[in-house]
Structures are given as structure tokens and as C-alpha cells.
């Protein structure tokens, strides 16, 4: 099987179900952003500050492929084979992890500036791409049916990435710099 098919050379791609759409379609932009997020999570997973979270980050990458499958499926077609799906326990797992990490962190009293170490910066980049994916899924859901668990998962994932960034700052013994607005 060749990696290239030439079927997209004119700016069209196929959804799961066979319908061809423009590569500029909101659905394509949405699952492309989820794919971008998956790549950032992969980079984050390889960072020294994320070693303790490696198994969960791999699980998250799996769930992002699941979300990509959901978003790449034509909602107007009946799909005859079983496709993976996000389940409520996926959201709960993120919430439990956020709560566990949060107990180890000092209370948050101000906005924090991203950065301080490459690992932390990658975490914040993943968080911002996750927020963009969440906005795109929200926009798509106003046009088409999208499983509400996809939106919930992305929302919790961005929260997880935020507390993970704070935990990495702590574990790497970096100063957490709070934003002090100029008045």
C-alpha cells in the first residue's frame, strides 16, 4: 500500500463513510487540530518533566485518535463497523488525575506565565492547542452532531495540561512566575 493516493491533490478528502469534502471544511480543520494536539502530547510525553505521567499521556494520545475518528466520520452516513468512542470514564480519569495533582500544588491566586523550562513550555503549547481544538469542536457542534463527551474530554484535557504544567514547574524546581498586570 502506498502512502500517497493522489486523491487529495485537488483539495478534497474523504470522510469515514466515503463522502468527499474540501480540506478547508470545518470538520477537517477540527480533526486536523486534534491531530496537531496529539503530536504536541507526544513531544510532551518525551520530556523529562513528564516521566511520571507517561502512561496517562499515551492513553490520552489513544483517546485523541478516538476523537479524530469521531470527527472524521460522516454524520450523514450509517457506518457498518464499530468505531472507538470516548466514554464517561475517560473524562472521570482526567478529573481524578487533576484532583490528585492539585492536592500537591500551592493554591493558585493569580495567572501564571507559561515557561521556565522546555518541558513546561511544551505542556502549555499542548494546552493552548487543546483549547483551540475545543473551540473548533464547539463551532462544529453548532453545524453538525458531535458527541458531547468529545467536548467534555477536551475541556478536561486542557485543565489537566494546565495543572500538569504547574506540577512540572514544582518537580523541576523552577520558579512559578505569576502575572502582575501593569496598572
Image (cartoon, grey):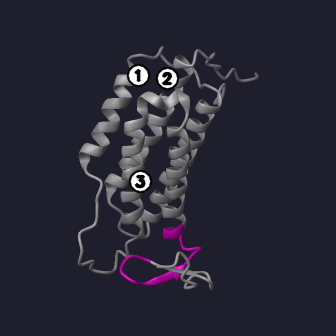
The mark that comes first in sequence, 2 or 1, is 1
Q: Point out which mark residue 48 bears.
A: none
**Residue 25 falls in image quadrant:** bottom right
Real-space Cα separation, disc 2 to disc 1, in angstroms: 8 Å
Residue at x 55%, y 55% (from the top left corner): 36
Q: Name the residue under label 1.
A: 102
Residue at x 65%, y 27% (from the top left corner): 117
Residue 51 position, x and y percent, is: 47, 30
Q: Mark 2 points at which residue?
A: 167
Q: Do the residues labelled 3 and 2 touch (CB within 8 Å)?
A: no
Q: Where does the magenta region start and end? A: 15-28
110 is within the stretch colored magenta: no
- Say which quadrant the C terminus sits in: top right
Q: What element carries label 1?
A: helix
Q: How crowded is mark 1: few (under 14 residues within 10 Å), some or many (20 or more)?
A: some
Q: Name the residue under label 3.
A: 64
Real-space Cα separation, disc 3 to disc 2, in angstroms: 22 Å
Q: What element carries label 3?
A: helix
* On screen, residue 175 above or below 27: above
20 is within the stretch colored magenta: yes
Q: In this view, does 120 lie to the left or right of 80?
A: right
Res 130 visible: yes
Amino acid at each position: 500500500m502506498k502512502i500517497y493516493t493522489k486523491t487529495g491533490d485537488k483539495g478534497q478528502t474523504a470522510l469515514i463513510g466515503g463522502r468527499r469534502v474540501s480540506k478547508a471544511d470545518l470538520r477537517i480543520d477540527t480533526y486536523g487540530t486534534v491531530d496537531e494536539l496529539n503530536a504536541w502530547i507526544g513531544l510532551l510525553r518525551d520530556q523529562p518533566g513528564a516521566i511520571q505521567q507517561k502512561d496517562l499521556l499515551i492513553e490520552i494520545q489513544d483517546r485523541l485518535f478516538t476523537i479524530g475518528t469521531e470527527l472524521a466520520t460522516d454524520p450523514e452516513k450509517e457506518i457498518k463497523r464499530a468505531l472507538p468512542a470516548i466514554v464517561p470514564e475517560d473524562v472521570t480519569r482526567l478529573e481524578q488525575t487533576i484532583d490528585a495533582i492539585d492536592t500537591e500544588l500551592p493554591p493558585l491566586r493569580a495567572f501564571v506565565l507559561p515557561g521556565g523550562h522546555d518541558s513546561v513550555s511544551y505542556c502549555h503549547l499542548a494546552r493552548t492547542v487543546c483549547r483551540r481544538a475545543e473551540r473548533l469542536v464547539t463551532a462544529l457542534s453548532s453545524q453538525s452532531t458531535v458527541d458531547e463527551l468529545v467536548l467534555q474530554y477536551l475541556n478536561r484535557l486542557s485543565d489537566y495540561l494546565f495543572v500538569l504544567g504547574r506540577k512540572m514547574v514544582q518537580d523541576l524546581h523552577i520558579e512559578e512566575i505569576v502575572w502582575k498586570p501593569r496598572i
